[in-house]
């Protein structure tokens, strides 16, 4: 286990280096000049020259990359050119909002998708199976922003049960926080639940036809024990992989959903940064989410070993 973990950690270093090169290089392809954008309508040449020097915009591209990478290695992701605050501080401020939204969305997805996939596989070619597949098709084909707008019209405008938009910290009012997060979390979790249902059904159908499952049934074990303890545990490996990747996607910011519900998370942060040519913020947020993807994949690989003892060899 330790040797496996050491190999994976060693592979992370060159991967992250390549990610930093891609982030910084592709960032330079964005149109516009951040110094001109910061200078305002007057665009005083002296102000522009000062801003170029302050943020190293007058340096060659490799030198600017060296400045940025050196700061990253020291834990300094730079400073926002628009609001003059450290990027790390902005990420720390937005991270709890995005993590909470992602966690609630994954809770909805797991609570709906995995049971639906199990039922669909166990009761194959029955009404339960057809119903679960219809749900999955609906979840995959429904745009998040459209579903969000419909939920606002129903639960906020018509019924008045939930707030239409905004965010309240759970430390201020937990009930108001959950009320403001339940609709965007369900919108995001609905689409992921559909994907999880399809993968769970496929994995369970494959496992349920295995020899050891037939042996367990021949021994007279209860069907619930056969399905949940023997079949599901071995079918969880692709589901764990998918769950880790989907959680990483949620951490990167659900742009449209956050915009519809006015959630101040990573999605809104990166959209504002792109429109304002705030390169440091874009680079910092993308680097953080890329690192989160890599770490989540590592955790998924470690979970394989815990779930399936055969992989410990």
Image (cartoon, grey):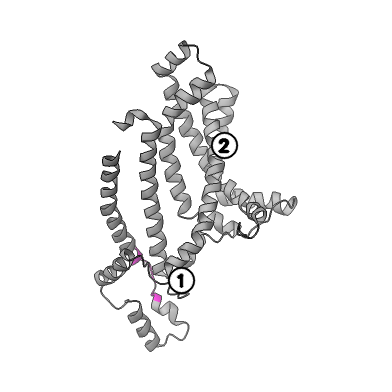
Estimate the x, y position of residue 172 in percent, counting from the top left.
Answer: 63, 60
Residue found at x 57% / y 42%: 108
Residue found at x 60% / y 59%: 169
> Mark 2 or 1 closer to N-term?
2
Residue 210 occupies quadrant? top left
Q: Which residues are magenta?
A: 27-34
Q: Nearer the viewer, residue 138 or 211?
A: 211
Residue found at x 46% / y 86%: 42
Residue 56 occupies quadrant? bottom left
- Say which residue label 2 marks: 112
Estimate the x, y position of residue 264 in percent, counting from the top left.
Answer: 55, 61
Q: Secondary structure at mark 2?
A: helix
Residue 32 shows in the view = yes
Q: Per the image, is 249 magenta?
A: no
Marks 2/1: CA–CA distance = 39 Å
Q: Is residue 62 left or right of residue 108?
A: left
Q: Is residue 297 left or right of residue 186?
A: left
Quadrant of the snapshot with the C terminus: top left
**Location of residue 140 with respect to 144 vertically, above or below:** above
- Say which residue label 1 marks: 276
Estimate the x, y position of residue 240 in percent, counting from the top left.
Answer: 43, 38
Local packing at callout 1 (Cα closer than 10 Å; few below 14, some 14-19, many 20+) is some
**Location of residue 309 with respect to 43 vertically, above or below:** above
Q: Per the image, is 30 magenta?
A: yes
Overall secondary structure of the magenta stretch? loop
Q: Which mark is residue 73?
A: none
């Amino acid at each position: 286990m330790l040797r496996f973990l050491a190999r994976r950690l060693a592979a992370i270093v060159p991967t992250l280096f390549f990610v930093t090169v891609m982030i910084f290089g592709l960032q330079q392809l964005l149109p516009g000049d951040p110094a001109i954008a910061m200078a305002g309508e007057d665009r005083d040449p002296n102000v522009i020259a000062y801003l170029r020097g302050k943020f190293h915009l007058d340096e060659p591209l490799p030198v600017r990359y060296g400045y940025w990478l050196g700061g990253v290695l020291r834990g300094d992701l730079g400073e926002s050119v628009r609001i003059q605050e450290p990027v790390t501080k902005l990420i720390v401020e937005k991270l709890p909002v995005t993590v909470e939204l992602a966690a609630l969305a994954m809770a909805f997805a797991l609570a709906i998708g995995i049971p639906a996939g199990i039922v669909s596989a166990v009761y194959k070619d029955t009404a339960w199976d057809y119903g679960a597949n219809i749900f999955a098709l609906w979840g995959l084909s429904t745009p998040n922003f459209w579903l969000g707008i419909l939920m606002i019209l129903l639960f906020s405008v018509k019924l008045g049960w939930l707030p239409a938009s905004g965010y309240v910290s759970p430390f201020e009012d937990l009930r108001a926080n959950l009320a403001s997060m339940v609709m965007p979390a369900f919108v995001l979790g609905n689409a992921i639940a559909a994907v999880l249902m399809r993968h769970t059904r496929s994995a369970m159908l494959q496992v349920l036809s295995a020899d050891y499952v037939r042996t367990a049934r021949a021994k007279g074990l209860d069907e619930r024990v056969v399905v949940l303890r023997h079949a599901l545990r071995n079918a969880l490996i692709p589901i764990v992989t998918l769950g880790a990747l989907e959680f990483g996607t949620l951490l990167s910011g659900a742009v449209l959903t956050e915009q519809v519900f006015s959630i101040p998370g990573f999605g809104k942060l990166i959209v504002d940064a792109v429109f304002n040519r705030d390169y440091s913020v874009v680079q910092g947020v993308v680097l953080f989410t890329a690192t989160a993807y890599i770490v989540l994949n590592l955790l998924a690989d470690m979970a394989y070993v815990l779930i399936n003892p055969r992989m410990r060899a």
